[in-house]
Amino acid sequence: MWRHLLERSIYGLLTLVLISALIFVATNVLPGDAARAILGRSATPEAVAALQAQLGLDRPLVAQYAGWVADILHGNLGNSVVTKGPVWDLVGPRLTNSLVLLASTSLIALPLSFAVGILMAVRQGKWFDNTANGFLIGTAGIPEFVLAIVLILLLSTQVLQLLPPTAVLRPGQTVLQNPQVLVLPVMTLTLAIMPYLSRLIRASLIDALASEYVVTARLKGLPPRVILLRHALRNSLVPSIQGAALSLAYILGGAVVVEYIFQYPGLGSALQSAVSQRDLYVIQAIVLIFAFGYIVFNMIADMLTILMTPRLRS
Amino acid sequence: MAEIAPALAVEVRNLRIDMPEGGDIVDDVSFTIRAGEVLGLVGESGSGKTTVGTALLGFARGGARIAGGTVHVAGDSSVNMLDLTPQQKRRLRGKTVAYVPQDPASALNPSLRIGLQLSEVIEAHEPETPRGEIDRRIEAVMQDVGLPADPAFLMRFPHQLSGGQQQRIGIAMAVILAPKLIVLDEPTTGLDVSTQNRILDIVKRLCREHGIGALHVTHDLSVIAHIADQVMVMYSGRVVEIGRVETVYDQPCHPYTQALLSAVPELRYRTQLKAIPGHAARPGQRPQGCFFQARCPIATQECKAHPIAMTRQDAGHDVRCLKSGVTAIAEPERLPDPLPATATSGKRPVIEVRDLHVAYGAFRVLDGVEFTVEKGECLAIVGESGSGKSTLSRALIGLVPQQQCTALLNGERLAPRARDRSRQQLQTMQYIFQSPHNSLNPRQTVESIVGLVHDTFNRASRSERRQKIAEVLSQVGLSPDAMFAFPDQLSGGERQRVAIARALMADPQVLICDEITSALDVSVQAAIVNLLKDLQQSRGLTMVFVTHNLALVRNLADRVLVLNQGKVVEMRGVAEVIDTPRHAYTKQLLANALVADLDSRAKRSGEKECLRA
């Protein structure tokens, strides 16, 4: 098992290297380079060339990449083209906010999806299952930004005025000091991943409940609670774990639209403004963090899968 | 009826189970099992035998509904298992009535340790039991089923056990609370004969020692000969005959029972196996009157008029037939054994294999195997699971790239891999797989399945191709209309015929058959064996027949190759090997086969009381 884990980590690392190369190439292929972005349109070619030399942009691409990677390994993500300050100063607080959003969404969405999925499977074909299924499929069909706008209309502007529509914080304040700004983004993201996750759990639990070992457990006279929790659920968790990992990685990286709508100060909105300002080093750093998140979540999911599947463990 | 008979393990009266869409799966099922006795329930696929089995626990699968009847367990006629609330049923299941599932590999929970799967039965029914007592009982039951009870073993997961060990755990789970009745649902299907015998011995001993009544559901008549005291034969959802095993096997009174027994190959001599013509009617399409009349050689108008009731033949021997006792199907005719092949008749053998080795890493599957197959003969390859017999047949057809050997087909060298062989060699040898359920593409019609082989070796117009497919289908006893069917529209026997037709389409000289009857019912097996014999005669086919069933070998093969741990331990004429085995391993195989031999359990005498009746 430890060997397997080591293998997975090595593969994860390789993937990360590959992605970093991709990111680097992609940002360099894009029109406009850092020097021109810093100096603006009116700069003279001489000034641009001087700054390029100063930033090392006149070196071959491979050397630039090597330098970039070396800097990252030393904890130096470079300086923002826009603020001129270190990228980390800009990205660090955003990362914290995104992690807070991720954690709060997981704390609500995962238990909720599991509970609803399990209940649907247990009541398969009955009233609750059909109603919940209809609701989830309906929700899945609505794009997130529409969901977000509907929630804003319902809960903070037109119908009720319970919550702030956007997460604009006073300077020096953190998200955790204003937890009310989290509510709407968390609700939107929960509604976004719940249809997928709870239907996945429902399907795999229904499979497990129809299996021979569950029939055997019933004919052993075990109480329904033991059959569900010990026999059926354990075996149906594996696909759900993989699904949950994908969902969480998506929230970390793919919540750009949701963060933008709520003006939530996370990585997604930071990425959005970095792109519009051509802040290359910030883009690189954020995309790298997203990739790292994907890899870590999938590795955790794989580890849990192995832990829960005796056949894989030995 | 109401009187309490303490010796009864179960009393079933007029059990009826309906399909979800209405109409009965089984009806009018009545029987009793006494404590310590085993009732063997035999029937072919679709006869409703498993449905009856789980109904004793008040359980029906797949939306089926227990519609009527009574099941009184342990002589307690005040409690009808079928009338209880789910809560009450749960308390009886596992404690008073226990179940041993068919396939332990899928019936044991893959993610739970076997120790937990045993202890949870006690915890569910006797939650007050202290931990020490639970451990003591697990130890006792493990000893009962012949497994180690040390903590390391109990910490194992099901996949870390062999098939036989898994089934012992299945049995241990069932008997750990000393139930009054256990239902065994084909517990030994898929295990090899010696493992099967050990399991059956355990079941028999536990029933005797602990006074447990058992219903043993199986499609294998020889298993019943081994284990049961009474036998109940089911056909198309009805009990057609029930009685002591000796009586029923010796004097089968229902034509279906007679037919079933005539389809079982004998170990001691070669017989002309009798297949039963036609099919069993599915629920909902059953005929009026006797359900077997369409296939019965002695049926008359009378049989078609009204439903037939059970009638008493003798004490404890009931039959559902108006002509009960008339010999409808005579005992199969005995045939002479084939003459022992003279060493070399001067002709070149069709297949010559010298020094065949197959190893997966350090594990030697086949180790220096040598044999020849003469033209027109049937060579049987026998051995237990793990002996390498399937690897041998797969190596021959070119599916084992790791093989090292000198193999000649008609004097020409055979490459180890099928794709390196010439088209003519591919055509000469054809392979039929064990399970017709997954060797036919479910998304193709029979015409495309057989036609693919046709197109590989021939070019013909559409009508000519169709003509040829129809011909080959009729050779294997299928109507030309079968060509438009998909595999799942056919029965198991029909599918295996399609697989044979596909092989014949190539016009081969050699057929390699890998356990091709082991997934089939006994009457279907008889039909397939007869078909192969006919084809061997009419087309001069050479056959390599891989099996673990020695009685089948007696019936079909000319010579036998006995394989043990990848080595040939004996290779002689079929009568010689079975009547006078030389090698210790062959003797052991035969001893195992004999336990299950019908003939040695119920000596059939020439004179039958049934005949005189």
Image (cartoon, helix red, strand yellow):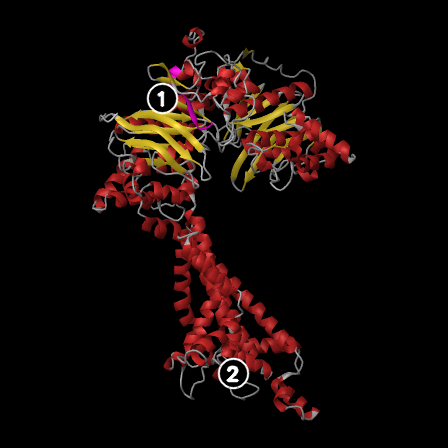
Q: Secondary structure at mark 1?
A: strand
Q: Secondary structure at mark 2?
A: helix
Dividing the image into 4 quarters, which one contains the N terminus of chain B?
Answer: top left
Question: Residue B109 occupies which quadrant of the picture?
Answer: top left
Question: Residue A63 occupies which quadrant of the picture?
Answer: bottom right
Name the mark on residue B230.
Answer: 1
Q: Label 1 sits on what residue type?
A: Gln
Q: Is residue A273 above or below residue B122?
A: below
- Give the left or right position of residue B196, taking residue B562 as reference: left
- Give the left or right position of residue A92, taking residue B153 as reference: right
Q: Position of residue B403 (x, y in %)?
A: 61, 37
Q: Nearer the viewer, residue B422 or B45?
A: B45
Residue B241 drawn in magenta: yes
- Give the left or right position of residue B159, taking residue B390 as reference: left
Q: What is the chain identity of the residue bearing mark 2?
A: A
Q: Which residues are magenta?
A: B236-247
Q: Is residue B120 visible?
A: yes
Question: Residue B40 occupies which quadrant of the picture?
Answer: top left
Contact, CB < 8 Å: mark 1 with mark 2?
Answer: no
Dividing the image into 4 quarters, which one contains the C terminus of chain B?
Answer: top left
Name the mark on residue A87.
Answer: 2
Number of other residues with Cα within 10 Å of mark 2, as a class: few under 14, some 14 to 19, many 20 or more: many
Q: Label 2 sits on what residue type?
A: Val
Residue A225 drawn in magenta: no
Q: Position of residue A195 (x, y in %)?
A: 48, 62
Q: Is residue A104 above or below residue B488?
A: below
Number of other residues with Cα within 10 Å of mark 1, as a class: few under 14, some 14 to 19, many 20 or more: many
| Identity of the residue drawn at 35% across and 36% down | B99
Q: How many numbered marks, from 0 up?
A: 2
Name the mark on residue B392.
Answer: none
Q: Nearer the viewer, residue B172 or B408?
A: B172
